[in-house]
Structures are given as structure tokens and as C-alpha cells.
Amino acid sequence: MEDVELVRIEPFEDARGYLKKTFKKSFFDTNRQIEEIYILYSCKGSVRGNHYHKKNMESFFIIKGTAKVAIKNVKTGFSQEFDINESDNLLMIVPPYVAHAFKNEKDIELIILAIATKEYVQIDNDTYKLVIYE
């Protein structure tokens, strides 16, 4: 896939349930450090993202539900839409200058784990709005 990297996560399963390692140093460029990890909870019809970053690289993993995902490279104009759900076990790595948006079109709550290489600080904001989903 152009512009974003999808890393397949191999769950470990035993009698207790599942273990999904969503953050491993080997998944990421070794020159970047993680500054922020957060969880998004999204109701049906809600949209997250609709922006891009010039410095920050973000990664997303669907914990629960299905996300309709749209990406757009602001430099090349390349765009794409696809769905990712919790059973796909994919970590989506979004580099700088790639706008991204997530929409929950299902009745079930969408829960996304997000990992960022730059901490959000309002006075040093690296978030640039670009509406993909209304």
C-alpha cells in the first residue's frame, strides 16, 4: 500500500485469551522515539483525524470495531479508502504529510490505540486540518 505501512500483528493465544504486541521497536524507524500513546473511543457516525502532520508519525491499531479509513498524501495527491477491523490484526503506520481520517459506520463502538512520535502540545501544534470525511 502506498504512503502507509501495514504491519501484521501475530496474536499469541492460550487458554487465558489473546496477547497482541502492538508496539515493538522493530516496527518503527529507529531514529524516532515514541512521545505519546492514547486510546480513541468513537461512537457510530463519528469521525477522527481529518488532518496530517509535518513532523509527527502516528500508528493506529483497531482494538474493537471496524474503521473506515481514508488517507491522502498532501504532496502527491494519492488517496485511498479501506476498512480495518479488530480481527485484521494490522498496525497502520502513517508517515508525515499523509492526511488520515477514521469513520465509525457501525453500531458497535470503535476503539483505536494510537502511538505518536511527537507529543501534542497546543503551542507547538503539528496538526494541519484536511477534511476527508464529513
Image (cartoon, helix red, strand yellow):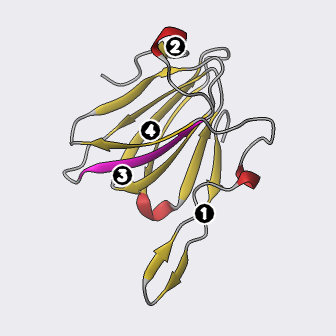
Q: Quadrant of residue 57?
A: top right
Q: Name the mark nearer the viewer: 2 or 3.
A: 2
Q: CA distance from mark 4 to mark 1?
A: 18 Å
**Horizontally, is 110 left or right of 32 in the view?**
left
Q: Which mark is residue 125?
A: 2
Indicate the position of residue 101 as horizontal and vertical percent values: 43, 30
Task: Tell me the amino acid under the disc marked 2.
Answer: Asn
Disc with the residue nearer the chain's start (3 vs 1):
1
Label 1: state its secondary structure. loop
Q: Quadrant of residue 126?
A: top right
Indicate the position of residue 23 as horizontal and vertical percent values: 61, 54
Disc with the residue nearer the chain's start (4 vs 1):
1
Q: Is residue 102 rendered magenta in the image? A: no
**Residue on which disc 1 sits:** 9
Residue appearing at x 66%, y 33% in the figure: 3
Which one is in front, 27 or 82? 27
Pointer 4 and pointer 1: residues touching (CB < 8 Å)?
no
Disc with the residue nearer the chain's start (2 vs 4):
4
Predominant SS of the magenta segment? strand
Q: Which residues are magenta?
A: 109-116
Q: CA distance from mark 4 to mark 3?
A: 9 Å
**Residue on which disc 3 sits:** 66
Task: Tell me the amino acid under the disc marked 4.
Answer: Val
